[in-house]
Structures are given as C-alpha cells and as structure tokens.
Image (spheres, coloured by chain):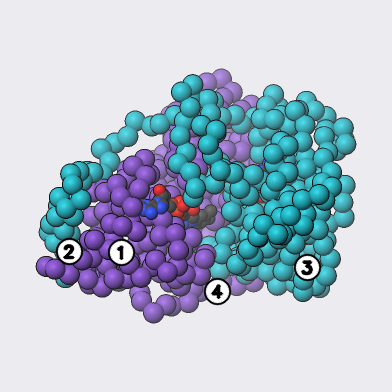
Amino acid sequence: MEILVCAKRVPDTAENEIEINSAGNDIKRDDLVYSVNEWDNYAVEEAIQIVEKHGGSVTVVTVGDDESEEILRREMAMGAENGILLTDEAFEGSDGKGIAALLKAAVEKGNYDLIMTGAQADEGYAQVGGMLAAMLDYPYASLVNKIEVGDGKLTVGREIEGGNIEINEIELPCVLSIQTGINEPRYVGIRGIRKVASVNIPAMGASDLGIDPASVGADAAGVKRIDYFVPEMGEGAQMLEGSDDEILEKLIELLKSKGGIK
Amino acid sequence: MARIFAYILHSNGELDDSALELLAAAKRIDPDADVTAIVTGSGIDDVCGKAAQSYKTVWKIDNEALSYPNAEVVRKALVNILPADSIVLLPHDHFGMDLGPGLSIKMDSSFVSDVVDIEKVEGNTLKVIRQEFTGQVSTHVHCDISSGAVVNMRPGVCQPAEGQAGEVVDKSGEAGDLSAKRKFVEIQEAEAGEVDITKSDVLVSVGRGIEDEDNLEIVFELAGAMGADVSCSRPIVDAKWLEKARQVGTSGKTVKPKLYMALGISGSFQHVGGVKGNPFIVAINKNPKAPIFQVADVGVEADILEFVPELTEKIKEL
Ligand SMILES: Cc1cc2nc3c(=O)[nH]c(=O)nc-3n(C[C@H](O)[C@H](O)[C@H](O)COP(=O)(O)OP(=O)(O)OC[C@H]3O[C@@H](n4cnc5c(N)ncnc54)[C@H](O)[C@@H]3O)c2cc1C
Ligand SMILES: Nc1ncnc2c1ncn2[C@@H]1O[C@H](COP(=O)(O)O)[C@@H](O)[C@H]1O
C-alpha cells in the first residue's frame, strides 16, 4: 500500500506557554520549541505499521518553510521512506482550502492508495483532511482510531462520543484523519535522525505543482485570522495566595467544606 | 442576506442539545433570519415535529440510506437540496468535523470551525471569534460568505434559543443519488473499566502536567487520602498510562461529581465538556494563564509534582 501522510510543523504546547506579541498580530515565536503536530505523528506511526504488515511505502508531505524540513526528517527517522516539502512564498497565509489544494496537487503527482492527515493541528480547525478528500472525490472518515486492511477497502473505527467507536467500511483510495491514541508512536533517537540527515528531500513550489500562485496564499484566503487577543475574562477562579503552608491550609479547609475529604 | 440552515442531530427520537444552540447562533448571524432546520434520517416524523416547535421551517429528508448519519451520505443529500450561497450551521463535534469541511468544498463555500462567538456580519464578511492552541489564545476571524459558508459552532457556547413554531416540508424526493463509498457497519460500545467515574462524588483528575507515568503514584496517593477516584484527560489515556474508562471529556466519560480537582490539565473544551452538574472545581496548574482557571472556582498556581505530595501529607495528618 502506498501511503501519503500530511504533517505540519507546530509549536509544541506541552513545552511552551503561548503568548501574544505586543502588536497582537502574532504569538511570540522566538523561544518556542517546534515539533510535528501530535496527531500527525500518530498518523505516520499508523502508516508505518500498515506498511510493515502489508508492504508498500510511506511518504510524508508538508506545506511550510525551509524549517519545516526538520519534521519531515524526524518522520523519516521513524521509518517513512520519502519526504516532500511544498514551499513557495505564494503559499504563505493560505487558509485550509489553500493548504488542501496544495496537498491535492501533491497527491496527484504520486500514486497513493491511502492518504492520512491528523484530526487537527495547532489552530484547531480540523478541516484539511475533509477538504482534501472532497477535492479528490475520495471517501473520507475523520477521527479514526482503528484501521484494518481488507481487499480494496479498509475497516475503520471512528471515535465518537462517550468512548464509543463507529465502525465503517471505506473503499480505497480514501482519506482518513487520525485521532491520537490509535497506536504508540515509536521513539526517535539522535541516531535515527543522523541516519537521515543527508537524505535529499525534494522541495516543490507553485510551478512544480502546476498551481496558479494567485489561487492560494493570503490573497486567495476566504477565511482570515485578523489578530490574536486575550479575551476579557469573566471572574475566573479565586486564586489561593500566600506562603505554601497558607495555601495548603486554605485549600484543605475548602476541600473539607465541599465534601472533598472523606 | 443568504438563507441560513441548521443541521439537526438527533438520536432515539430526541433532538441533540445542539439543535437549539444552532438556532441561537443563526440569530446572531442575522436576527431577522427565518432559519430552516434540516432533519435527515429514516422514519423521522416525530423528530421533525419536535424541531418544528422551535424552527419556522423544517426540511425533512427521509430515506433508508440516512438511517444512520453517515457524513458522506448526508453530504450528498445536502448538496442536492441546499440552494447555492447557503449558510449552513453544524455542531463542532465528531459529526460536524466529519461533514463540515467536505460539505464546504462541494458547496463551493467558506468553512470556519470551532466558532466560540459570532460578532456580526458586515457586507459579505462574517466576523467570528475562535481560539487556537487549545484555548490559550483567542483570535478574530473574518469569513467571506459571498458564496455561502459552513460554520461549525463549538457545543455549549450558545444558550439554546426559544424560537417559534413552524411547519415541516418534505424534501425527501429531492435527495437524489445517495450511494456511498463509505458504509456504516456498527457502533462498538466503550468497555467498562475497573472504576465507574460517572458515579464518583469526588474526582482527582490528572493531565499531561504529570509528565511521567511513574509520577501517577502521587495522584493515587492524594485520591486515596481524600477518598476520591482518579480520572484523567485524554493524553494520559493515549499514552496508555490509564485505562480509557477513566477519561473525562467529549470522547470519554461525562462525569457529575460534587468536587472536581484538575491537576496539570489545561482545560480544553473537549475535556471540560465532560464535566457536568456544576461541581466545585479546583485547578492546580503551573501556568497562571491556563484556560482551566476560567472554569475553576478555586485555583492554585503550583507545580503539581511538588504541591500534590505536600497536600497529601497534610491531609493524612488531619
Ligand atoms: C475530537 C476530539 C476529542 C477529544 N476528546 C477529549 C476528551 O474526551 N478528553 C480530553 O481530556 N481531551 C480530549 N481531546 C483532547 C483535547 O483537545 C486536549 O488536547 C486535551 O484535553 C489536553 O489534555 P491536558 O490538559 O492533559 O494536556 P495539555 O493541554 O498539554 O495541558 C497540560 C497542562 O499541564 C500544565 N502543567 C505542565 N506541567 C505541570 C506541572 N509540573 N505542574 C502543574 N501543571 C503543569 C500545563 O501548564 C498545561 O496547562 C479531544 C480532542 C479532539 C480533537
Ligand atoms: N501546512 C500543512 N502541511 C501539511 N499538512 C497539513 C498542514 N496543515 C494541516 N495539515 C494536515 O491537516 C491536519 C488537520 O489540520 P487542520 O485542519 O489545520 O486542523 C493536520 O493534522 C495535518 O495532517
């Protein structure tokens, strides 16, 4: 099975507090640690496991800048065979549709049976996979947390409410968005990264993809972020202040009065 | 102004909570709108009647192929029935996420998801508020609605609207070809775990802030001292540190404790969405700007790895 996984380089929120810059037009990016979007890492692991069982190869593609190459290498160190970097000034500021249109062009340059995205990325849209599928006219299932490979089709589980799983049969080729927890992504050590350090990763721009630069990027975006802001908060929590002992004492009193200590 | 439609989710003959939330959202987009509800399914006269208690127009699409809401089939029906340039409202849940993005492509309209507030419409621009980085920052977003839009609303952010009673229009004949390459097979129910956290009065809930599986011990010790049960956020289950039955949230359990302690949990809407019944919430987090402090009653800015063992000690001394 030939599998294409779409991955995005994002600030790692487990490592960073996200703060807004003084102009309010971006987050403070200087000291951020970046990594591959958590959901995409599960998708790559799943793709590798399918290929280990059923043969084929895994390609990872990202739309980004030069620095985005590092996440392709990371996923190649996990076991993806190929990486493709889609990069061009014309791509900057693309909305979800723009990103999906670029990924569609990349899909059409290859011969893939299965395309995977993460369920969502840093901006929380959860849109690119479904858009890409509709553009390709492929069937789609989102929030997939279980995959069994059949003949010309897959049986997939979708995570729905309450921890229940919705089982579907889906014809290949198809697009799946992958939910976290579907597997246990393998560890990537320094040695693994070193092994792929000098592998050539092709970069493709608008002309390589046969994309009209005016159809993507900020000017073509129908959905635009105008600014970042900190909302006027309601009252919020009463923060316990004082020395450690005072805080502990106050908290214990509260827990007692609310029936929290039996 | 374009016509506004709300897709009505329902199960076992009951309307989903989102049904009247979407009506409220539609009124925010256009206070004068005659919002049309769309109900799909098989044998749905009752549900359509319920929707028509609040919506002036209800479009019924009754077809065996729609007996389970498979997003691919629903999308086909909607694309055949909806006028061009429609504004379609969906809940941003496991169904809306499945349907919305692809629907916007097929309708050739804009898509904006996980909307937490609607500001206004100016000309062809819908102005909304979203959040990024699991709620750590908010953003103003402009969405071009000149050729329509699909808008996914975050569940729970709009108060259900009252609405006016209306009539049901049968659109089943216009649904067209509903064949699909994705077929619904069955629902597999979640497995029961060793504890039933939906029955717990006091929950000590742990999130990614615990950092390491071995550190979970301090959480169980605190819970033990308090006589509480341990629940958790999703990353703890994803990492297989705790069983799925302990996960609180939209894709986990809905809990109704009297007291909920959130330790190293940021407070994403999918997590907090599983905490119901208005419990007293205590949050302990080292980031004073964590969104959990917006929903908590009492907060402590602290490192749980240090604070929790101290708290356990003090409680044991009581
Ligand atoms: C469709 C869908 C369904 C989902 N369903 C659920 C669900 O049912 N339940 C759920 O929980 N999530 C769910 N999620 C995931 C959700 O969006 C969040 O990613 C998740 O809730 C984050 O968990 P967390 O708060 O533990 O981790 P994080 O967001 O990483 O937060 C960790 C927090 O710990 C704090 N911290 C770190 N170290 C320390 C320390 N030493 N001491 C004190 N504080 C510390 C940090 O400041 C941060 O606030 C779902 C997501 C999707 C897309
Ligand atoms: N710039 C990008 N490059 C490659 N894939 C992306 C990009 N942005 C989003 N995706 C894919 O789309 C998924 C969902 O992201 P989103 O729709 O932005 O929430 C991600 O998990 C990725 O798989």
Question: On residue B204, which mark appears?
Answer: 1
Q: Which residue is rendered at x = 21% and y = 66% of the image? A: B313
Chain letter for mark 1, please. Answer: B
Q: Quadrant of residue B198?
A: bottom left
Chain drawn cyan, letter? Answer: A
Q: Nearer the viewer, residue B164 or B20?
A: B20
Is disc 4 placed on a helix, strand or loop?
strand
| The C terminus of chain A lies in quadrant | bottom left
- Amino acid at the residue labelled 2: Lys
Rendered position, A239 above or below A23: below
Q: Position of residue B236 (x, y in %)?
A: 46, 64
Question: On residue A51, which mark appears?
Answer: 3
Q: Image quadrant of ligand 1?
A: bottom left
Q: CA distance from mark 3 to mark 2?
A: 53 Å
Query: Could you confirm whether marks 3 and 4 are on the same chain?
Result: no
Rendered position, A53 above or below B163: below
Q: Is residue A189 left or right of residue B300?
A: right
Q: Which residue in the protein does label 4 denote? A: B188
Q: Nearer the viewer, mark 2 or mark 4?
A: 2
Chain letter for mark 2, please. Answer: B
Q: Residues within 10 Å of mark 1 (few under 14, many from 20)?
A: many
Q: Nearer the viewer, residue A4 or B218?
A: B218
Q: CA distance from mark 3 to mark 1?
A: 41 Å
Check the rendered structure and report the hue given to chain B.
purple
Q: Residues within 10 Å of mark 2 (few under 14, many from 20)?
A: some
- Amino acid at the residue labelled 1: Val
Is disc 2 placed on a helix, strand or loop?
helix
Chain letter for mark 4, please. Answer: B
Q: Which residue in the protein does label 2 denote? A: B314
